Image (cartoon, rainbow, N blue to C red):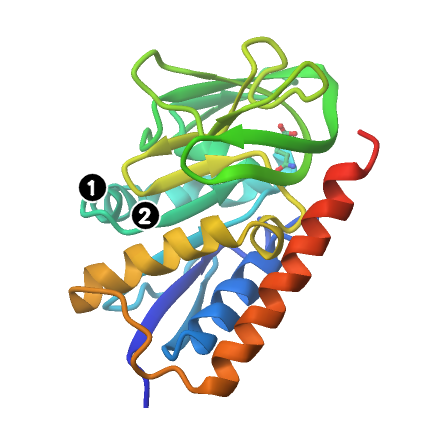
Amino acid sequence: MGKTIDVMSLYPKDMNIYGDSGNVLTIRRRLELYGYEPRIHQYNQGDEWPDHIDMILGGGGQDTGQKKIIDDFFKRSDLLRSLAADGVPMLMICGLYQLFGEYFETVDGTRLEGIGIIGAHTVGQDVRMIGNLVERSDRFGDIIGYENHSGQTFLNEDVQPLGHVDQEGCGNNGEDHTEGARVHNVIGTYMHGSLLPKNPAISDFLIETAVTRRYGGFDTADQTPEQAAELARLDAVAASARKAAAARPR
Ligand code: GLN
């Protein structure tokens, strides 16, 4: 039996659009193929939180979904902040990225407080920012996905973006060419797609960080030759998906 890794899918009922649940499937599959034993948990409003979690994945949602989860989300904010401070790797897409910031003022003027793990704020506008997107990141290479949001996110000065977009993409706000944010092991981004199947470098960052935190190091000692071959096949599929997605018109 491989070593267990506990992965939390955060608010999958209300915060999961444009295939974001594919991120959970990708992490599960890659963990298995590296020889680990993924245990996937789901947390929706009112659920119990398990004793131990190694990684947290959250998706996007419309403003209405964000309003639905916000009260419960606040009840969990201390917990999430302390896990983030402890270095638990997290990936938050779009709607949850916005709520991991300091606040989100929606286009109808409602102000939703965020939990402030990411030093950023978001303001809704009338025009939506939609399209296929390639962003450049020093740490992860080209990141390939799809954005669809009305919120404009502005990072505080000391916050590192996940990457940069060129003239065609909007990214965080359509103005400063930044996209997403990275704070310690927490990644926030507007990239749907799903993101992780097409971006194995980010999947592996999350996996290696989670495994190293729990077991003191990452290795593939329990990986079978069949698993290694299947992982290589998946990587080849990801490479051709990246090529096809990057060539798509915006
Ligand atoms: N409601 C947010 C916005 O439109 C998030 C949308 C999303 O998660 N795709 O800005």
Q: Is residue 148 above or below residue 232?
A: above
Q: Residue at x 45, y 33 (%)?
A: 99
Please state if 79 lies on the left or on the right of 180 as rendered. Answer: left
The alpha-carbon separation of the residues under discs 2 and 1 comes to 14 Å
Three-letter residue code for mark 2: Arg
Q: Residue at x 44, y 19 (%)?
A: 121
Say few, some or many: other residues with alpha carbon within 10 Å of mark 2 (under 14 / 14 to 19 / 20 or more). some
Q: Position of residue 195 (x, y in %)?
A: 59, 48
> Can residue 67 be seen by looking at this rendering?
no
Q: Residue at x 56, y 15 (%)?
A: 177
Secondary structure beneath dot 1 equals: helix
Three-letter residue code for mark 1: Ala
In the image as oriented, which residue stretches furthest toward the top?
175
Between 201 and 79, the one lying in front of the other is 201
Q: Say which residue label 2 marks.
A: 76
Which quadrant holds residue 94?
Answer: top right
Name the image quarter holding the N terminus. bottom left
Q: Say which residue label 1 marks.
A: 85
Secondary structure beneath dot 2 equals: loop
